[in-house]
Image (cartoon, rainbow, N blue to C red):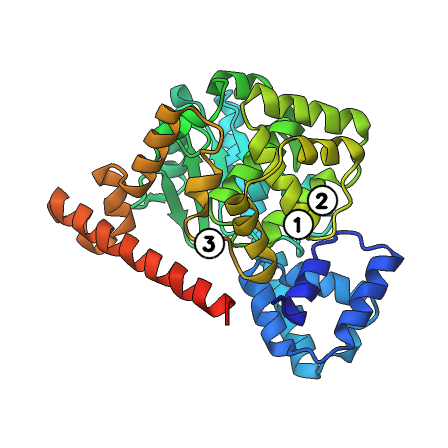
Amino acid sequence: MTSTEQKILACSTELNPDSNQQEKMRQLMSHDVDVDHLISLAYREGMAGLLYKNLMKSGVLENLGHEQRERLQTLYYQTVLSNLKLIQDLKEILHLLDKKKIRIVLLQGIALLQPIYDDIGLRPLTDIDLWVLQKDYASLISILGSQGYERDHIYPNTFRKGSTIFDLHTQIPWADRIKASKMLLAKSQEDIYSETQVADFEGQEVLCLSQYDQVLLLGLHALKHNVSRLVWIADIKSLLADWKSPDWEALINRAEELGQEKTLVYIFFLIRLFDFRLPSKASQLLERKRLGFLEKRALEERIKRDSLPLWSPLLLISSRKGLKARFSFILETLFPRPEILRQVFPDSADRKVWVLYLKRIVQLVGFIKVSLKRKKGSNL
């Protein structure tokens, strides 16, 4: 059963709530709400800023207790300060990249911050995701090193300096870690890159994914991580909010080109769970590509809980791929290369390979037990 707090957060996924959505928020907040739990839940879901804005716009922020209001405001301003730091640090790196005529592609949260969120306190970022072509990878590493960023000894594509983290990608979607991920897309990395668009980031030129590829890859990223942060749903809803009929048609066509129609169906199904009104073309796709029982069951769990079931990426991400591609993806996801397992188990970095795989088996058994326990709890 969905709690009132979860319903309030679902309502808060609106970036610009209209009068009806504001009234819905007022009604939900009039119920018996555990506000402390609501704020903690919002923080975990990356939704504290959006909750703050929605409560303010609905005129119910002042109904919170003084300490609760202060806590929510503090989370909002912490996000502002953190994001300002990340923006400044990225600008410094972009300036140095520009001198070497190197262009990188902004991915995920940092790519959405300015074009989508008019207030940087609404969207918390944990790191800066960059896609760099392999030919420019060494130059980017050199620039990061010259600015004091140190390579993480566990995650070799992660570079840190203080609170700022750069997460580098030479392939998408996440094929740096799971090589079989290359088979998820029907077109090459070069095709995705050729569709990128020049954008302005604080006065400097960067590349961003096309709006259609951005939606599809954000969806894949969310599914990979069990949609464990509600802010990812808010991201996609905000991207789609003002689209016209030609945009929806182009998105559906692009999904077909990339072999990602099923991913798009999952995205549509998820955002509809969170009260997003789909246009006719999107609804028609949902009707044509009907979901199976397990697919629906996995996706519907998100409205009730803080993530999809642990097993859902194996079912959803490789859906509708050929048998070879699906088997390869599932096998490599369950039992990745030893260097990836050393990242999963950093305390066992020096262990023999067979020990790593034994630990992985134990971990998977634990995941199954947790999943069964959750299922048993939902049936009570």
Q: Which residue is mark 3?
A: 309
Picture coordinates of residue 371, whole percent (x, y)? 40, 59
Residue nearest the viewer, comparing 301 with 206: 301
Picture coordinates of residue 77, whole percent (x, y)? 64, 63
Residue at the (12%, 45%) spot, across then down? 354
Q: Which residue is mark 1?
A: 234
Of labels 2 and 3, earlier in sequence is 2
* Amino acid on which disc 3 is placed: Pro
Q: Using residue 167 as the reference point, say whether residue 355 is left or right of it.
A: left
Q: Using residue 274 as the reference point, say whether residue 144 is left or right of it.
A: left
Farthest residue to the right: give it: 19
* Amino acid on which disc 1 is placed: Ala
Circle 1 packing at 10 Å, graded few (<14), some (14-19), many (20+), is many
* Amino acid on which disc 2 is placed: Ser
Circle 2 packing at 10 Å, graded few (<14), some (14-19), many (20+), is some
Using the numbered discs, state the Cα–Cα distance from disc 2 to disc 3 in whole angstroms.
25 Å
| Secondary-structure class at tag 3 | loop
Seen in the picture, residue 269 relative to 195 is either above or below; the reply is below
Seen in the picture, residue 58 relative to 174 is either above or below; the reply is below
Q: Using residue 180 as the reference point, say whether residue 122 is left or right of it.
A: right
Residue at the (47%, 47%) spot, across then down? 225
Residue nearest the viewer, comparing 269 with 113: 269
Q: Which residue is mark 2?
A: 238
